[in-house]
């Protein structure tokens, strides 16, 4: 054999080396997120926590001491309480444009209003840093986004739990 570049033993050793090494790892499957804007601040919401996104719903105001409660919206034929994300996150109540509503996945329909829908983002698990659940337990960490630095991850389930706990406390106080 001319120009073969190696003996049969060399070829056998190279062949064996290929199968002796572990196979290359599978690329990480990106985690799906909704990229939104709340009062000018970008946030990510895991699609696993989202039951739906609606635009242009009419919100009927309700009298309430909870300044974050914007009112009720009719979504899929059901009344859904809608809270302003800007107010829940410490901003001014009613400051956000109420164009978009994200429905939290869960047993009770609950909507959160925000002003900007940026779109879908697939984030590699390696680009996500988990939060510690400290002073702001509704933040589930941050994720690196190309060209945008790190973006906080909102936990709708935690916000829903906090609102339910607040409502339970208010109901117990009212019963006294």
Image (cartoon, rainbow, N blue to C red):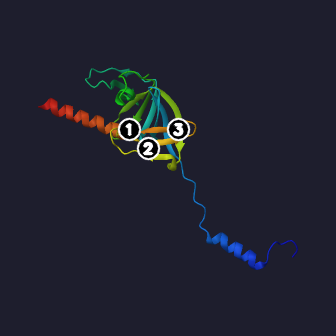
Rounded to the nearest whole Å, what is the CA distance between mark 2 and mark 3?
A: 23 Å
Q: Quadrant of the N terminus?
A: bottom right
Rounded to the nearest whole Å, what is the CA distance between mark 3 and mark 1?
A: 22 Å
Q: Secondary structure at mark 2?
A: helix
The residue where tag 1 is placed is 156
Q: Is residue 25 left or right of residue 96?
A: right
Task: Mark 3 vs mark 1: give the one in front.
Answer: 3
Task: Point out which mark residue 128 bears.
Answer: none
Q: Residue at x 39, y 27 (%)?
A: 86
Above or below, 138 against 58 in this view is below
The residue where tag 3 is placed is 149
Q: Nearer the viewer, residue 120 or 12?
A: 12
Report the label total. 3
Tell me residue 48's x, y (percent): 44, 43
Tell me residue 159's x, y (percent): 34, 36
Task: Mark 2 vs mark 3: give the one in front.
Answer: 3
Q: Residue at x 22, y 35 (%)?
A: 168
The residue where tag 2 is placed is 48
Q: Residues within 10 Å of mark 3 (few under 14, many from 20)?
A: few
Task: Mark 1 vs mark 2: give the one in front.
Answer: 1
Tell me residue 141's x, y (percent): 42, 43
């Amino acid at each position: 054999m001319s120009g073969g570049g190696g003996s049969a033993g060399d070829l056998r050793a190279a062949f064996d080396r290929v199968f002796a090494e572990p196979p290359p790892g599978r690329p990480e499957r990106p985690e799906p997120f909704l990229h939104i804007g709340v009062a000018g601040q970008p946030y990510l919401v895991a699609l696993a926590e989202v039951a739906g996104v609606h635009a242009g719903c009419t919100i009927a105001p309700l009298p309430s001491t909870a300044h974050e409660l914007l009112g009720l919206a009719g979504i899929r034929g059901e009344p859904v309480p809608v809270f302003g994300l800007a107010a829940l996150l410490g901003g001014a109540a009613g400051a956000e444009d109420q164009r978009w509503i994200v429905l939290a996945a869960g047993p009770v329909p609950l909507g959160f209003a925000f002003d900007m829908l940026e779109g879908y983002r697939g984030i590699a698990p390696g680009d996500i840093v988990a939060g510690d659940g400290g002073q702001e337990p509704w933040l589930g960490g941050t994720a690196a986004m190309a060209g945008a630095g790190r973006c906080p991850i909102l936990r709708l389930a935690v916000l829903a739990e906090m609102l339910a706990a607040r409502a339970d406390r208010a109901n117990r106080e009212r019963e006294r």
